[in-house]
Image: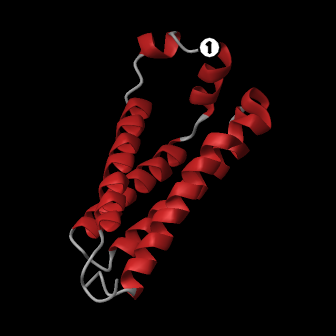
Amino acid sequence: MTGTKRSVGYWIVAVFALVWNLIGVAFWYMQISMTPDRLAMMSEPERQIYEATPGWINIAFAVAVFGGVLGALGLLMKKRWAGTMFLVSLVSLLVQMIGAYAVTPAWAVYGPVGLVMPAVFVLIALFLLWYTNKAKARGWLS
């Protein structure tokens, strides 16, 4: 398909991107609104990671998920700036993930297996950025 006609797949990707990133917003909110009761339910190693997480990692987390929400909304509104938002989201996600493993005991707790989920997150972010650039090239975004 070329021109301004969008496939059903386009809308599926856009809705998926929105739902995925809204789930990320929910996880971010749970992270920043941790109560002492919920913290007490964590295992000791998980609690150590949480307590060692500096505020700037939570800021990067927020930028990643809210940037992703804006990117998804941009796709749904057929706007070219969606790609910029997905790029901001990807960069922030990388800062968050690298930072978490660099400044918290995450590596000692999870080891290499702990990189599986972050890798999945990065792959999804890369896909959304790639797909948005493909949509731009096809003239689907204005």
Q: Quadrant of residue 81?
A: bottom left
Query: Is 59 displayed left or right of 111 in the figure?
Result: left
Residue in the picture at 37% in, 86% down: 138
Query: Is 67 displayed left or right of 50 in the figure?
Result: left
Residue in the picture at 44% in, 79% down: 134
The secondary structure type at the circle numbered 1 is loop
Estimate the x, y position of residue 91 in percent, counting from the top left: 54, 64
Estimate the x, y position of residue 7 in percent, counting from the top left: 30, 71
Q: Which residue is outermost to the left? A: 77
Vertical placement of residue 2 versus 45, above or below: below
Estimate the x, y position of residue 111 in percent, counting from the top left: 78, 34
* Quadrant position of the N terminus in the picture: bottom left
The residue identified by callout 1 is 43
Residue in the picture at 27% in, 69% down: 74
Vertical placement of residue 133 versus 109, above or below: below
Query: Is 105 displayed left or right of 133 in the figure?
Result: right
Estimate the x, y position of residue 122 in percent, counting from the top left: 58, 55
Label 1: how many Cα within 10 Å (few below 14, some 14–19, many 20+): few
Total number of numbered labels? Answer: 1
Q: Nearer the viewer, residue 49 or 56?
A: 49
- What is the three-letter code of the residue carrying label 1? Ser
Q: State the colouring used for the structure image.
A: secondary structure
Q: Nearer the viewer, residue 116 or 110?
A: 116
Residue in the picture at 47% in, 69% down: 129
Vertical placement of residue 127 versus 34, above or below: below
Q: Nearer the viewer, residue 56 or 119?
A: 119
Query: Is 116 displayed left or right of 60 in the figure?
Result: right
* Quadrant position of the C terminus in the picture: bottom left
